[in-house]
Amino acid sequence: MKLTKNIVGWMFYDFANSAFTTVIVSVVFSTYFIRHVAIGPAGYGERIWGLAVGLSMTLVALTAPILGAVADYSRSKKKFLFFFTYLTALSTGLLFFVKGGDILMGALFFITANYAFNIANVFYDAFLPEISTPFNIGKVSGYGWALGYLGGLVSLLISLLLVNRNIHWVFPMIGAHLLIFSLITFFLLREVHKPSKRSNYLRVARDRILFSLRHIARTPQLLRYLLSYFVYNDGIYTVIVFAAPFGIKRFDMTEQAIIVFFILAQFTSLLGAAFFGWLSDKLNVKSSLSISLLIWIAVVVWAFLCGSAREYYFVGLLAGLAIGSSQANSRTMLSLLTPADKQAEFFGFFTLTGRLSSIFGPILYGWIALRTGSLRYSILSLLVFFILGWLLLQTVSLRKGMAQSQLLESKEL
Protein backbone atom coordinates (compact mmCIF):
# COMPACT_ATOMS: atom_id res chain seq x y z
CA MET A 1 0.00 0.00 0.00
CA LYS A 2 1.41 3.38 -1.05
CA LEU A 3 1.29 6.03 1.66
CA THR A 4 0.20 9.19 -0.12
CA LYS A 5 0.06 12.61 1.54
CA ASN A 6 -3.71 12.28 1.81
CA ILE A 7 -3.47 8.93 3.57
CA VAL A 8 -0.76 10.10 5.98
CA GLY A 9 -2.65 13.30 6.73
CA TRP A 10 -5.87 11.40 7.31
CA MET A 11 -4.27 8.84 9.61
CA PHE A 12 -2.59 11.51 11.74
CA TYR A 13 -5.97 12.85 12.76
CA ASP A 14 -6.48 9.56 14.57
CA PHE A 15 -3.20 10.22 16.39
CA ALA A 16 -4.46 13.67 17.37
CA ASN A 17 -8.04 12.99 18.44
CA SER A 18 -7.59 9.64 20.21
CA ALA A 19 -6.09 11.54 23.14
CA PHE A 20 -9.53 13.00 23.86
CA THR A 21 -11.34 9.66 23.93
CA THR A 22 -8.59 7.95 25.86
CA VAL A 23 -7.85 10.54 28.54
CA ILE A 24 -11.01 12.65 28.85
CA VAL A 25 -13.83 10.20 28.14
CA SER A 26 -12.23 6.95 29.27
CA VAL A 27 -9.61 7.52 31.96
CA VAL A 28 -8.79 10.77 33.73
CA PHE A 29 -11.73 13.16 33.51
CA SER A 30 -14.35 10.42 33.82
CA THR A 31 -12.83 9.18 37.08
CA TYR A 32 -12.14 12.72 38.31
CA PHE A 33 -15.75 13.75 37.65
CA ILE A 34 -17.27 10.69 39.33
CA ARG A 35 -14.99 10.73 42.39
CA HIS A 36 -14.38 14.43 43.04
CA VAL A 37 -17.00 16.49 41.19
CA ALA A 38 -20.34 14.61 41.34
CA ILE A 39 -20.11 13.77 45.03
CA GLY A 40 -23.02 11.77 46.48
CA PRO A 41 -24.29 8.31 47.48
CA ALA A 42 -23.12 5.07 45.83
CA GLY A 43 -23.83 5.18 42.10
CA TYR A 44 -24.59 8.93 42.06
CA GLY A 45 -21.41 9.89 40.19
CA GLU A 46 -21.98 7.17 37.60
CA ARG A 47 -25.57 8.33 37.18
CA ILE A 48 -24.63 11.99 36.55
CA TRP A 49 -21.72 11.04 34.29
CA GLY A 50 -23.97 8.74 32.26
CA LEU A 51 -26.52 11.54 31.86
CA ALA A 52 -23.82 14.00 30.70
CA VAL A 53 -22.57 11.51 28.13
CA GLY A 54 -26.13 10.71 27.03
CA LEU A 55 -27.06 14.38 26.58
CA SER A 56 -23.98 15.13 24.48
CA MET A 57 -24.76 12.14 22.29
CA THR A 58 -28.37 13.25 21.93
CA LEU A 59 -27.18 16.59 20.56
CA VAL A 60 -24.88 14.76 18.15
CA ALA A 61 -27.72 12.52 17.00
CA LEU A 62 -29.95 15.53 16.32
CA THR A 63 -27.42 17.53 14.30
CA ALA A 64 -25.02 15.05 12.65
CA PRO A 65 -27.32 14.16 9.70
CA ILE A 66 -27.83 17.84 8.85
CA LEU A 67 -24.15 18.74 9.10
CA GLY A 68 -23.14 15.62 7.19
CA ALA A 69 -25.56 16.43 4.36
CA VAL A 70 -24.37 20.05 4.19
CA ALA A 71 -20.73 18.95 4.09
CA ASP A 72 -21.45 16.42 1.37
CA TYR A 73 -23.26 18.95 -0.82
CA SER A 74 -20.94 21.91 -0.26
CA ARG A 75 -17.76 19.80 -0.41
CA SER A 76 -16.65 21.53 2.79
CA LYS A 77 -15.77 18.56 4.95
CA LYS A 78 -12.34 19.94 5.79
CA LYS A 79 -13.71 23.30 6.96
CA PHE A 80 -16.19 21.60 9.25
CA LEU A 81 -13.51 19.24 10.51
CA PHE A 82 -11.28 22.22 11.32
CA PHE A 83 -13.99 24.12 13.20
CA PHE A 84 -15.21 21.25 15.39
CA THR A 85 -11.69 20.02 16.11
CA TYR A 86 -10.68 23.34 17.62
CA LEU A 87 -13.97 23.69 19.49
CA THR A 88 -13.11 20.32 21.07
CA ALA A 89 -9.61 21.53 22.00
CA LEU A 90 -10.92 24.75 23.57
CA SER A 91 -13.66 23.09 25.62
CA THR A 92 -11.24 20.41 26.80
CA GLY A 93 -8.77 23.02 28.00
CA LEU A 94 -11.52 24.74 30.01
CA LEU A 95 -11.95 21.60 32.13
CA PHE A 96 -8.89 22.89 33.99
CA PHE A 97 -11.20 25.18 35.97
CA VAL A 98 -13.57 22.41 37.17
CA LYS A 99 -13.16 21.77 40.91
CA GLY A 100 -14.91 19.53 43.44
CA GLY A 101 -18.68 20.10 43.44
CA ASP A 102 -18.71 22.03 40.13
CA ILE A 103 -21.17 19.57 38.60
CA LEU A 104 -22.86 22.01 36.22
CA MET A 105 -19.63 23.62 35.00
CA GLY A 106 -17.91 20.27 34.51
CA ALA A 107 -20.90 18.79 32.72
CA LEU A 108 -21.30 21.79 30.38
CA PHE A 109 -17.64 21.89 29.36
CA PHE A 110 -17.57 18.14 28.84
CA ILE A 111 -20.85 18.06 26.87
CA THR A 112 -19.53 20.78 24.55
CA ALA A 113 -16.19 19.02 24.04
CA ASN A 114 -17.72 15.59 23.52
CA TYR A 115 -20.32 16.99 21.11
CA ALA A 116 -17.70 18.77 19.00
CA PHE A 117 -15.41 15.73 19.04
CA ASN A 118 -18.09 13.40 17.72
CA ILE A 119 -19.33 15.86 15.09
CA ALA A 120 -15.76 16.30 13.82
CA ASN A 121 -15.58 12.55 13.31
CA VAL A 122 -18.53 12.71 10.89
CA PHE A 123 -16.39 14.70 8.45
CA TYR A 124 -13.19 12.81 9.22
CA ASP A 125 -14.76 9.41 8.52
CA ALA A 126 -16.24 10.67 5.26
CA PHE A 127 -12.71 11.20 3.86
CA LEU A 128 -11.91 7.47 4.06
CA PRO A 129 -13.40 6.38 0.70
CA GLU A 130 -11.84 9.41 -1.02
CA ILE A 131 -8.28 8.54 -0.02
CA SER A 132 -8.46 4.74 -0.41
CA THR A 133 -9.68 2.03 -2.78
CA PRO A 134 -11.89 -1.01 -2.17
CA PHE A 135 -8.69 -3.07 -2.14
CA ASN A 136 -6.87 -1.19 0.64
CA ILE A 137 -9.67 0.47 2.58
CA GLY A 138 -9.37 -2.08 5.38
CA LYS A 139 -5.64 -1.47 5.75
CA VAL A 140 -6.00 2.32 5.68
CA SER A 141 -8.76 2.25 8.30
CA GLY A 142 -6.91 -0.26 10.47
CA TYR A 143 -3.62 1.60 10.30
CA GLY A 144 -5.44 4.82 11.12
CA TRP A 145 -6.84 3.26 14.27
CA ALA A 146 -3.41 1.83 15.09
CA LEU A 147 -1.83 5.28 14.82
CA GLY A 148 -4.68 6.59 16.95
CA TYR A 149 -3.87 4.18 19.74
CA LEU A 150 -0.26 5.27 19.54
CA GLY A 151 -1.47 8.83 20.07
CA GLY A 152 -3.55 7.64 22.99
CA LEU A 153 -0.48 5.97 24.45
CA VAL A 154 1.59 9.15 24.20
CA SER A 155 -1.15 11.19 25.88
CA LEU A 156 -1.51 8.62 28.66
CA LEU A 157 2.20 8.67 29.41
CA ILE A 158 2.19 12.46 29.70
CA SER A 159 -1.00 12.31 31.79
CA LEU A 160 0.68 9.86 34.17
CA LEU A 161 3.38 12.44 34.87
CA LEU A 162 0.89 15.29 35.30
CA VAL A 163 -1.49 13.37 37.59
CA ASN A 164 1.31 12.93 40.10
CA ARG A 165 1.68 16.72 40.25
CA ASN A 166 -1.69 18.34 39.48
CA ILE A 167 -4.49 16.48 37.72
CA HIS A 168 -6.02 19.72 36.40
CA TRP A 169 -3.09 20.26 34.01
CA VAL A 170 -4.00 17.05 32.18
CA PHE A 171 -7.00 18.70 30.51
CA PRO A 172 -5.30 21.66 28.73
CA MET A 173 -2.51 19.26 27.77
CA ILE A 174 -5.03 17.11 25.89
CA GLY A 175 -6.47 20.19 24.21
CA ALA A 176 -2.96 21.18 23.09
CA HIS A 177 -2.27 17.62 21.85
CA LEU A 178 -5.37 17.74 19.66
CA LEU A 179 -4.57 21.25 18.45
CA ILE A 180 -0.94 20.57 17.51
CA PHE A 181 -1.13 17.16 15.86
CA SER A 182 -4.29 17.91 13.88
CA LEU A 183 -2.25 20.53 12.03
CA ILE A 184 -0.56 17.67 10.17
CA THR A 185 -3.97 16.64 8.88
CA PHE A 186 -4.95 20.13 7.84
CA PHE A 187 -1.68 20.64 5.95
CA LEU A 188 -1.62 17.31 4.13
CA LEU A 189 -5.24 16.22 3.61
CA ARG A 190 -7.00 17.51 0.49
CA GLU A 191 -10.60 17.19 -0.62
CA VAL A 192 -11.16 15.51 -3.96
CA HIS A 193 -14.05 17.70 -5.09
CA LYS A 194 -14.17 21.44 -5.59
CA PRO A 195 -16.59 23.43 -3.43
CA SER A 196 -20.10 23.89 -4.78
CA LYS A 197 -21.20 27.42 -5.67
CA ARG A 198 -24.78 26.84 -4.58
CA SER A 199 -26.15 28.23 -1.36
CA ASN A 200 -29.23 27.61 0.81
CA TYR A 201 -27.59 24.59 2.42
CA LEU A 202 -30.44 24.09 4.89
CA ARG A 203 -32.81 23.23 2.08
CA VAL A 204 -30.17 21.01 0.50
CA ALA A 205 -29.61 19.31 3.87
CA ARG A 206 -33.34 18.65 4.20
CA ASP A 207 -33.50 17.18 0.70
CA ARG A 208 -30.45 15.00 1.32
CA ILE A 209 -31.84 13.72 4.60
CA LEU A 210 -35.13 12.83 2.94
CA PHE A 211 -33.12 11.13 0.19
CA SER A 212 -31.26 9.06 2.77
CA LEU A 213 -34.43 8.09 4.60
CA ARG A 214 -36.00 6.90 1.37
CA HIS A 215 -32.99 5.09 0.00
CA ILE A 216 -31.60 3.41 3.09
CA ALA A 217 -34.83 1.44 3.06
CA ARG A 218 -33.91 0.36 -0.48
CA THR A 219 -30.57 -1.05 0.70
CA PRO A 220 -31.70 -3.76 3.13
CA GLN A 221 -28.17 -5.01 3.83
CA LEU A 222 -27.08 -1.54 4.94
CA LEU A 223 -30.22 -1.27 7.05
CA ARG A 224 -29.45 -4.59 8.74
CA TYR A 225 -25.89 -3.53 9.41
CA LEU A 226 -26.99 -0.21 10.91
CA LEU A 227 -29.34 -2.10 13.21
CA SER A 228 -26.52 -4.43 14.28
CA TYR A 229 -24.18 -1.47 14.80
CA PHE A 230 -26.84 0.34 16.81
CA VAL A 231 -26.94 -2.55 19.26
CA TYR A 232 -23.30 -3.58 19.66
CA ASN A 233 -21.94 -0.02 19.63
CA ASP A 234 -24.05 0.65 22.72
CA GLY A 235 -21.94 -1.87 24.57
CA ILE A 236 -18.63 -0.62 23.17
CA TYR A 237 -19.22 3.01 24.04
CA THR A 238 -20.41 2.18 27.54
CA VAL A 239 -17.18 0.26 28.14
CA ILE A 240 -15.19 3.27 26.91
CA VAL A 241 -17.05 5.57 29.28
CA PHE A 242 -17.05 3.38 32.40
CA ALA A 243 -14.05 1.03 32.24
CA ALA A 244 -11.84 3.30 34.37
CA PRO A 245 -14.49 4.18 37.01
CA PHE A 246 -15.32 0.46 37.25
CA GLY A 247 -11.72 -0.40 38.10
CA ILE A 248 -11.38 2.42 40.61
CA LYS A 249 -14.68 1.73 42.40
CA ARG A 250 -14.64 -2.08 42.17
CA PHE A 251 -10.98 -2.72 43.05
CA ASP A 252 -10.00 0.55 44.75
CA MET A 253 -7.42 1.36 42.07
CA THR A 254 -5.70 4.76 42.08
CA GLU A 255 -5.71 7.23 39.17
CA GLN A 256 -2.09 6.30 38.48
CA ALA A 257 -2.92 2.60 38.44
CA ILE A 258 -5.84 3.04 36.07
CA ILE A 259 -3.69 5.10 33.70
CA VAL A 260 -1.13 2.27 33.66
CA PHE A 261 -4.05 -0.09 33.00
CA PHE A 262 -4.99 1.89 29.90
CA ILE A 263 -1.38 2.28 28.79
CA LEU A 264 -1.08 -1.50 28.65
CA ALA A 265 -4.41 -1.75 26.81
CA GLN A 266 -3.13 0.66 24.14
CA PHE A 267 -0.64 -1.94 22.97
CA THR A 268 -3.29 -4.58 22.36
CA SER A 269 -5.59 -1.92 20.85
CA LEU A 270 -2.87 -1.04 18.37
CA LEU A 271 -2.32 -4.71 17.62
CA GLY A 272 -6.04 -5.32 17.20
CA ALA A 273 -6.56 -2.38 14.82
CA ALA A 274 -3.61 -3.32 12.61
CA PHE A 275 -4.14 -7.09 12.62
CA PHE A 276 -7.90 -7.06 12.10
CA GLY A 277 -7.53 -4.40 9.40
CA TRP A 278 -5.25 -6.86 7.61
CA LEU A 279 -7.67 -9.70 8.33
CA SER A 280 -10.61 -7.79 6.87
CA ASP A 281 -8.74 -7.44 3.58
CA LYS A 282 -7.53 -11.05 3.69
CA LEU A 283 -10.96 -12.55 4.47
CA ASN A 284 -13.70 -9.93 4.59
CA VAL A 285 -14.68 -7.16 6.96
CA LYS A 286 -17.81 -8.95 8.19
CA SER A 287 -15.86 -12.00 9.37
CA SER A 288 -13.26 -9.80 11.03
CA LEU A 289 -15.95 -7.76 12.81
CA SER A 290 -17.78 -10.91 13.93
CA ILE A 291 -14.63 -12.21 15.63
CA SER A 292 -14.22 -8.84 17.36
CA LEU A 293 -17.70 -9.02 18.85
CA LEU A 294 -17.06 -12.53 20.17
CA ILE A 295 -14.01 -11.13 21.95
CA TRP A 296 -16.23 -8.42 23.48
CA ILE A 297 -18.57 -11.07 24.87
CA ALA A 298 -15.60 -12.76 26.56
CA VAL A 299 -14.48 -9.38 27.99
CA VAL A 300 -17.85 -8.70 29.63
CA VAL A 301 -18.11 -12.16 31.17
CA TRP A 302 -14.54 -11.94 32.49
CA ALA A 303 -15.10 -8.46 33.94
CA PHE A 304 -18.19 -9.72 35.80
CA LEU A 305 -16.27 -12.66 37.26
CA CYS A 306 -13.06 -10.70 37.87
CA GLY A 307 -11.97 -10.71 41.51
CA SER A 308 -8.86 -8.53 41.76
CA ALA A 309 -7.12 -5.49 40.32
CA ARG A 310 -4.34 -7.70 38.97
CA GLU A 311 -6.81 -9.84 37.07
CA TYR A 312 -8.56 -6.70 35.81
CA TYR A 313 -5.34 -5.74 34.03
CA PHE A 314 -5.66 -8.86 31.88
CA VAL A 315 -9.30 -8.04 31.17
CA GLY A 316 -8.08 -4.67 29.94
CA LEU A 317 -5.58 -6.26 27.57
CA LEU A 318 -8.33 -8.35 26.00
CA ALA A 319 -10.67 -5.34 25.83
CA GLY A 320 -7.96 -3.36 24.05
CA LEU A 321 -7.73 -6.04 21.38
CA ALA A 322 -11.51 -5.98 20.96
CA ILE A 323 -11.92 -2.23 20.75
CA GLY A 324 -9.07 -1.74 18.30
CA SER A 325 -10.49 -4.29 15.92
CA SER A 326 -14.22 -3.56 16.22
CA GLN A 327 -14.04 0.21 15.74
CA ALA A 328 -11.81 0.03 12.67
CA ASN A 329 -13.92 -2.70 11.08
CA SER A 330 -17.17 -0.86 11.80
CA ARG A 331 -15.99 2.17 9.84
CA THR A 332 -14.80 0.02 6.95
CA MET A 333 -18.04 -1.95 6.82
CA LEU A 334 -20.07 1.23 6.52
CA SER A 335 -17.86 2.57 3.71
CA LEU A 336 -18.33 -0.60 1.67
CA LEU A 337 -22.11 -0.56 2.04
CA THR A 338 -22.71 3.10 1.10
CA PRO A 339 -22.62 4.91 -2.27
CA ALA A 340 -19.27 6.61 -2.90
CA ASP A 341 -20.83 9.96 -3.83
CA LYS A 342 -22.95 10.16 -0.68
CA GLN A 343 -20.34 9.25 1.92
CA ALA A 344 -20.60 12.34 4.15
CA GLU A 345 -24.37 12.14 4.17
CA PHE A 346 -24.47 8.43 4.97
CA PHE A 347 -21.71 8.78 7.53
CA GLY A 348 -23.99 11.33 9.15
CA PHE A 349 -26.60 8.63 9.50
CA PHE A 350 -23.94 6.20 10.66
CA THR A 351 -23.04 8.70 13.37
CA LEU A 352 -26.74 9.16 14.12
CA THR A 353 -27.08 5.40 14.60
CA GLY A 354 -23.98 5.12 16.76
CA ARG A 355 -24.69 8.18 18.86
CA LEU A 356 -28.33 7.23 19.40
CA SER A 357 -27.15 3.90 20.76
CA SER A 358 -24.50 5.71 22.82
CA ILE A 359 -27.27 7.57 24.62
CA PHE A 360 -28.88 4.52 26.14
CA GLY A 361 -25.92 2.43 27.30
CA PRO A 362 -24.25 4.96 29.64
CA ILE A 363 -27.61 6.10 31.05
CA LEU A 364 -28.67 2.49 31.68
CA TYR A 365 -25.32 1.67 33.28
CA GLY A 366 -25.59 4.65 35.62
CA TRP A 367 -29.21 3.87 36.49
CA ILE A 368 -28.40 0.26 37.39
CA ALA A 369 -25.41 1.40 39.48
CA LEU A 370 -27.56 3.86 41.44
CA ARG A 371 -30.48 1.45 41.89
CA THR A 372 -28.47 -1.62 42.90
CA GLY A 373 -25.28 -0.11 44.29
CA SER A 374 -23.39 -2.83 42.38
CA LEU A 375 -21.20 -2.11 39.36
CA ARG A 376 -21.02 -5.84 38.56
CA TYR A 377 -24.67 -5.86 37.50
CA SER A 378 -24.10 -2.72 35.45
CA ILE A 379 -21.26 -4.34 33.53
CA LEU A 380 -23.22 -7.57 33.06
CA SER A 381 -26.01 -5.67 31.30
CA LEU A 382 -23.63 -5.02 28.39
CA LEU A 383 -23.64 -8.71 27.50
CA VAL A 384 -27.06 -8.33 25.87
CA PHE A 385 -25.79 -5.65 23.47
CA PHE A 386 -22.85 -7.70 22.21
CA ILE A 387 -24.73 -10.97 21.79
CA LEU A 388 -27.69 -9.40 20.00
CA GLY A 389 -25.40 -7.22 17.86
CA TRP A 390 -23.42 -10.29 16.77
CA LEU A 391 -26.57 -12.18 15.86
CA LEU A 392 -27.89 -9.29 13.78
CA LEU A 393 -24.55 -8.94 11.99
CA GLN A 394 -24.79 -12.55 10.78
CA THR A 395 -27.89 -11.61 8.75
CA VAL A 396 -25.91 -9.08 6.66
CA SER A 397 -24.67 -10.15 3.19
CA LEU A 398 -21.61 -8.06 2.33
CA ARG A 399 -21.72 -9.06 -1.35
CA LYS A 400 -25.37 -8.07 -1.77
CA GLY A 401 -24.84 -4.89 0.23
CA MET A 402 -21.99 -3.69 -2.00
CA ALA A 403 -24.07 -4.39 -5.10
CA GLN A 404 -27.01 -2.45 -3.66
CA SER A 405 -24.79 0.57 -2.85
CA GLN A 406 -23.40 0.60 -6.40
CA LEU A 407 -26.93 0.50 -7.81
CA LEU A 408 -28.03 3.37 -5.60
CA GLU A 409 -24.99 5.42 -6.63
CA SER A 410 -26.04 5.22 -10.27
CA LYS A 411 -29.47 6.68 -9.50
CA GLU A 412 -29.13 10.42 -8.88
CA LEU A 413 -31.93 12.62 -7.66
Image (spheres, helix red, strand yellow):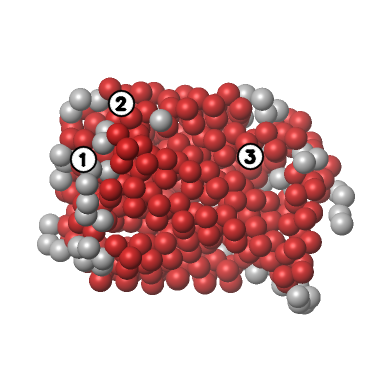
Question: Does residue 77 sit above or below 233 in this rendering?
Answer: below
Disc number placed over residue 226 in the picture, else none: 3
* Spatial separation of the CA atoms under disc 2 and disc 1: 14 Å
Position of residue 329 in the picture relative to residue 21 (left or right): right
In which quarter of the view is residue 218 placed? top right
Quadrant where the image shows the C terminus: bottom right
* Spatial separation of the CA atoms under disc 3 and disc 1: 34 Å
Q: Residue at x 42, y 32 (%)?
A: 382
Quadrant where the image shows the N terminus: top right
| Mark 3 surroundings within 10 Å by alpha-carbon count, few (fewer than 14), some (14 through 19), many (20 or more) | many
Question: Does residue 77 sit above or below 228 in this rendering?
Answer: below
Q: Earlier in the sequence, mark 3 or mark 2?
A: 3
Residue that badge 2 annotates: 304
Q: Confirm whether residue 323 shows in the render.
A: yes
Residue that badge 1 annotates: 249
Locate residue 36, reporting x and y percent: 20, 56
Q: Amino acid at mark 3?
A: Leu
Label 3 secondary element: helix
Position of residue 95 in the picture relative to residue 226 (left or right): left
In this rendered view, identify the residue nearer to me: 155 or 136.
155
| Mark 2 surroundings within 10 Å by alpha-carbon count, few (fewer than 14), some (14 through 19), many (20 or more) | some
